[in-house]
Amino acid sequence: MKHLIHTLNKAFDNRVRLGVMAVLMANEVVSFTELKEALDLTDGNLASHVAALEKVGYVSVSKQFVGKKPNTTYSASKEGKTAFQEHLEVLEKLLRG
């Protein structure tokens, strides 16, 4: 039988990705600026971590223009919500022993 630690989702190993998913789980849709400010990140740092989560299908990205300004928003995909919830459940089991 696999030890619980080996069942943690590697996509959430990084604290920034963990933070991104936590914010997205608590909010239906979050703008780039809101997410950047909530996690105190640089543009590039946030963009690279969101891209990694998007690549595995955990985050949905929507880009549009509001007037002449670009507006990027993010949301957790159904797969992302499930994966994150499973990750949290394993962490809880580890905490309980």
Image (cartoon, grey):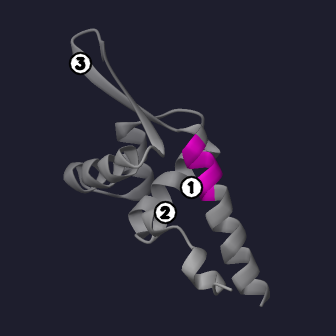
Q: Amino acid at mark 2?
A: Leu
Query: Label 1, on which residue?
Result: 22
Residue 22 coordinates in the image, percent (x, y): 56, 55
Q: Are marks 1 and 2 in contact (CB under 8 Å)?
A: yes
Distance Cα–Cα, label 3 vs label 2: 29 Å
Q: Say whether residue 80 is left or right of residue 86.
A: left
Check disc 2: other Cα within 10 Å, few if <14, some if 14-19, many if 20+: some
Would you identify the image quadrant in which residue 67 lies? Answer: top left
Q: Is residue 19 above or below residue 7?
A: above
The front one of 75 and 97 is 97
The amino acid marked with disc number 1 is Ala
**Quadrant location of residue 34?**
top left
Give the magenta part as a residue range: 79-84
The answer to which quarter of the image holds residue 83 is: bottom right
User: Which label sits in the foreground, 1 or 3?
Assistant: 1
Of residue 15 and residue 86, the one placed in the foreground of this image is 86
- Is 40 included in the stretch rendered in magenta? no
Label 2, secondary structure: give it.
helix
Secondary structure at badge 1 equals helix
Neighbour tally class for label 1: few under 14, some 14-19, many 20 plus, Cα within 10 Å: some
Q: CA distance from mark 1 to mark 3?
A: 27 Å
Q: Which residue is mark 2?
A: 18
Q: Residue furthest right?
A: 96
Give the residue number, with chain letter if any, for mark 3. Answer: 69
